[in-house]
Image (cartoon, helix red, strand yellow):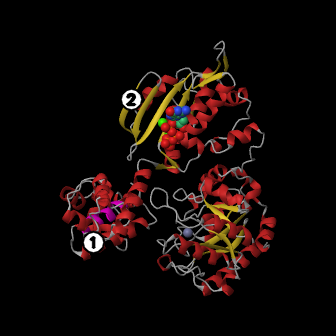
Amino acid sequence: MENKEIARVLSETADLMEIAAEDSFRIRSYRNGATAVEGYPERIEDILGNPERKVTDIPGIGKGLAAVLGEIVDHGSCERRDALLEKFPRATLEFLKIQGLGPKGIALILEHYRITSIDDLERLCQEQKLRVLPRMGAKLEEKVLRSIAQYRQRTGRFLLSYADGMAQSLAETLSQVPGVDAVTPAGSLRRGRETVGDLDLLVTGPSARDALDRFVADPRVQEVLGHGENKASAKVGRDGLQVDVRALAPESFGAALQYFTGSKDHNVAIRTRAVKMGFKLSEYGLFRVEDDAKVAGATEAGVYEALGLPWIPPELRENTGEIEAAAEGRLPELVELGQMRGDLHMHTTETDGRATLLEMAEAARAQGYEYIAITDHSKALAMANGLDEKRVVAFARQMREINHEGIGIRVFSGIECDILKDGAMDLADDALAELDLVIGSVHSHMNQEGAEMTDRLLRALECPHLRIMGHPTGRLLLERDAFPFDFDRVAAAAARRGVWLEINASPERLDLHGPLIRAAKAKGAAFTISTDAHHPKHLTHMRYGVLTARRGWLGPADIRNTLPADQFAAALRTRP
Ligand code: DGT
Ligand code: CA
Ligand code: CA
Ligand code: ZN
């Protein structure tokens, strides 16, 4: 069990205790425990399993919580949480995920109404029954309704990185079955969508069907949903990700790959094109209508070619102009992972990162980069021990010395400077002027109304030292939606000011996403792709950022950190 999951159970328990109006001192100890666990560099599970170690040595973990941690690692919950889940409706954990209520609000609602599901909660809002409760109003009802809609959209979906990891590990297992040649992921995963509903795996080889038997018997499988001759479906892993595995004949592999990669909208448009040309397209192949002769099907490229099209990269297959572009021979040249020459957003132990500057630099060098920027937090993020002006100046000097001596990779001195509530920068101009690269990001007052957030970002863009706008929309996948600002105006201003927009490759963000990238490019904006790494292993997330950039139709020329180090350094010094 990962620390993050343990922390989630602890803070859920704290929320439930708050709904039950339990002792505030105890509630706080659970909350502090959650923070301590989440931020701890070692796995709690390992420490618990080691008789020579004590979890009580971790600051914030007392004897009582130590026992609770043991329970959570053993069976995913603890007695206190289980008891409270008996007392309150099961759906209380879902209510907690609806923004705007909080434990106190939920307690108040449960005191006055009998509700046992999100549907019930929705009905209360529609029937205007929240506004009669103390400290609640019409505005809150609207907010809760919006939040319920968002919650429904994201439940049942998984982060791309999680689905990708599961696909790779299942593919490894299934490809070891004798007579299986290949296991190929299709669906939204292959298109690089930032969240995935279910996994679609295609198996080929003389004994491809044996892979289905192996799959349903796998220990990762929680529940088999179906097991036929050519297809098996099951819920896999702790969170029940659905996986569809299909065994395919080699002569129709290309048609099946095309079909199951989707998207559905792309497929509908492609099939319409086929019909107009006198063909019938299915997952089994492309057939001529007049004599039922098979024209293509073994390879995906063959299917597209028979339809008069070049092969279309999966990331573009959303029916947003890619078929027209392909037909007219103007598909874009897309950026590739191997073209990235540096990573421009990462944190170290100076603030909330897990590794030192030299460890991060070494990991980046091992990944083949020519340069990186170290961009720790600024002082407004006091919890992360953000840098003040004095530390910034000292850090910039240290970087000049390190580069002078040389460590095998060029290090640009940077900062991820908070954009304050009113759009001012968290650090004084003369300190920012010492640095090679200033990223500006919003980390506070995230509930501002659209107009206020737009003004805030436009004002930040006026700062002469700002070079990159970090994770511009602020969204957290499956958790928090983008800030509701006027994106086109901000993108146009960024283009005018020569401020690059970051494509944040962290799997929890992937911000900007495809459609916004295209909108920003249309306004003349340029981009960077960076991982926002807090640990050396996060540097490999670059591939998710590249997939996202490809979904935004970007080529290497659109992305500043594909430039060689000298040209990148020159670009940093140039303003429009
Ligand atoms: P997901 O799983 O929600 O993240 O998204 P997908 O795109 O992986 O969707 P999924 O798993 O339902 O289906 C995989 C692909 O199969 C989909 O992208 C296109 C194809 N497909 C599924 N159902 C239909 C359909 O009714 N019509 C057409 N043309 N294609 C379909
Ligand atoms: Ca799918
Ligand atoms: Ca599916
Ligand atoms: Zn940030």
Q: Which residue is mark 2?
A: 226
Total number of numbered discs in the rendering:
2
| Residue with the most extreme top position | 291
Q: Which residues are magenta?
A: 8-18
The answer, for residue 564, to whether it is visible in the render is: yes
Image coordinates of residue 273 in percent, x first then y, are 66, 30
In this picture, residue 92 sits left or right of residue 477: left
Q: Which residue does the image show at 25% across and 58% down from the upper left?
A: 78
- Tell me, yes or no, whether the highlighted magenta stretch contains residue 131: no
Residue 14 shows which numbered tag? none
Image coordinates of residue 294 in percent, x first then y, are 65, 17
Could you tell me the amino acid type at mark 2? Gly
Image coordinates of residue 497 in percent, x first then y, are 73, 72
Q: Nearer the viewer, residue 398 or 485?
A: 485
Snapshot quadrant of residue 29? bottom left
Q: Which residue does the image show at 29% across and 55% down from the upper left?
A: 123
Q: Is residue 76 above or below residue 570?
A: above
Q: Which residue does the image show at 40% across and 35% down from the upper left?
A: 234
Snapshot quadrant of residue 49? bottom left
Residue 27 shows which numbered tag? 1
Looking at marks 1 and 2 on the same chain, the residue that comes earlier in the sequence is marked by 1
Could you tell me the amino acid type at mark 1? Ile
